[in-house]
Amino acid sequence: MRRMPLCLGLAVWMQIAVAAPGEAAPTVDQAIGLKPVQQGIGYNTPLGEQVKKCKIEAAKSGGSGWVIRGESGQLLRRFLDTNNDNKLDQWSYYKDGLEVYRDVDANFNGKADQYRWLGTGGSRWGLDRDEDGSIDSWKVISPEEAAAEVIAALSTKDAKRFQRLLLSTEELKALGVGKTLEKDLRERLATTRRDFDSLLKTQKMVASNAKWLQFGATRPGIIPAGTDGATADLLAYDHAAAIIETDGKHGQVSIGTLVRVSDSWRIVDLPKSESSAGFFYASIERAPDVVEGSSGNINAGLQKLLDELEKIDEQSAATTSTATLATLNRSRADVLEKIAAQATKLEDRMNWVRQFADTVSAAVQSGEYPKGIQRLESMMSKLAKDKDASSLVPYVKFHHMTAEYGQKLQKPNADFVKIQGQWVKDLEAFVKAYPKSESTPDVILQLAMANEFSGKESSASKWYSKIISDFASSAIATKAAGAKRRLESVGRSIELRGKTVDGLSIDLAEHRGKVVLIHYWATWCQPCKEDLKTIKALQAKYASKGFAPIGINLDNDQQALKDYLRATALSWPQLYEEGGLDSRLANELGVLTLPTMLLIDKSGRVVRRNIHSTELETEIAKLTK
């Protein structure tokens, strides 16, 4: 993860970053010559005669700077000065028109200190405190990427690369897991830190040319607040594994236990050639059983199928042809079904079937595999005859229902009212047939949403209540409780506390005596951004009469909000917490769609809980008299 030699140094670009009026722009050769600070980035780079056909032009959004486009107009690079100091502080690299990586100088001192993988490049966000080109810690990293980093650390014999994945002492304390779990975790981490250097010298699991292929694990589970005195829920994996390839052969490395800390996943155990003992869930099976025998090598049949799956995924990423994607999605379904059939453990087979249902349903809804409907129906029939795996029928059925609903909506001249009515009937029938399945909470949430959006609020409240009472431990129970609270909020006071993107604490209770508009929005939501214009005009007109808007941004990427606020100044506070539509701020009132706006009177009571921007001025004028 060290700085690469640059054809055109980063420091040079800091100085020539943005040409003053009348000065010449940097050349295409100079722009294309600049490389990312981190290695291994897959991005488009024109060569030879292709460079002459590229164009460089002034950036039109996000700040001043330069954009480089290929012959067809596709984005290749974007270099920006986001704080108007006439020096670049953001360098973006693109693949197939999508940004996949970004170097960032967040403190504007002339050195990159943050590195972000984006789009198809992944979700990693590395921090470099001493600005030496080496990542010191991960602000964001997924469990899949954490597993890949473990393999990279082993193959390159880089102890520091592994150590920065480990749960730190400060993070362990902040988890609030309770005294017993904290003590056990601290001891396990101490052993891992102590023994990793020795492992590097002796391990033969991962060769220098090993390649990470995929992440394997059963679904993560939650250790709920209150367990052994825990003060917060803890989301964790046990028995996680990484599938690797070395010289055409596949193998598996046990990653062990991972825990989520904010938006990052942290390692607890030493990597091993065999599955580690479970830490949190003693009864949970280990990761999908793709390994045969004690040697760690996958049998020839499974190896061939995994090779096919990898090839299909690579081809899918490289095409935009709907017809080609339909063929590839059919092939992917074939391979997943074969892998499930070969799995020797029931839990592994069930996980592969879930993946089959997930991917086929998504492909149908995107219009990239219309015949996937029949594949899901066929899978349901097979599962119904399988005594061991018949419990998966509801899971596949819900994905079949969702795919069918999405497909109907895509048809020309679709009768939305009729389709929606049938959708609700299908959901109700599912709940009646499968009252306790793993998919039932999601089905009930869909029912509640459908009733709420059609104005049947009492029915919606009933369904939200059912989730709360019957599935209290499910991940969506918190969202359901918030949605019920929102539905019943008119005439009542609500609580709202949080911090702005700049770290300022905001408490709705301190706004008594003012008319407050709470606006849930995101930068990817175009209607939301139109609302911002309306709110800005209303604030200018009614602020002196006691009108005070509060924004709650639900972007998954905080940088997207910061970039937007740099380009479009908003004079009212914008609360933000990681998690987007699943964040605490969204869940407290069960916000399901954007934009959502609530209007609060001077006494602190909700007047309107779902007001449209066209109705705002009339209501605000009344309340500020």
Image (spheres, helix red, strand yellow):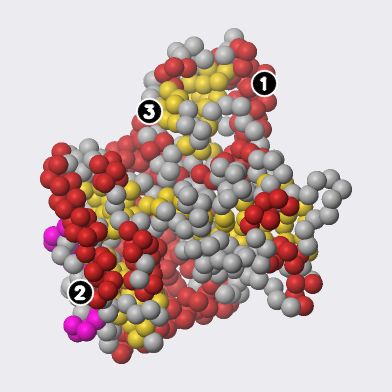
Residue at point 51%, 33% (across, down): 502
Region rendered in magenta: 279-296
Q: In x, y percent, where is residue 19?
A: 78, 49
Left or right of 411? Residue 252 is: left
Camera-side mark, 2 or 3: 2
Q: Which residue is denoted by mark 2 in the rendering?
A: 274
- Residue at position x 63%, y 17% from top? 542
* Residue 490: x %, y % from top left: 42, 23
Toward the bottom, the furthest residue is 300
**Residue at which label 1 appears:** 540
Residue 551 included in the magenta stretch of the image: no
Give the residue number, with chain letter if any, for mark 3. Answer: 488
Instruction: Name above or below for residue 549 compared with residue 305.
Output: above
Residue in the image at 57% along x and 75% along y = 318
Q: Is residue 395 left or right of residue 294?
A: right
Real-space CA distance between mark 2 and mark 3, rounded to the nearest whole angstrom: 53 Å
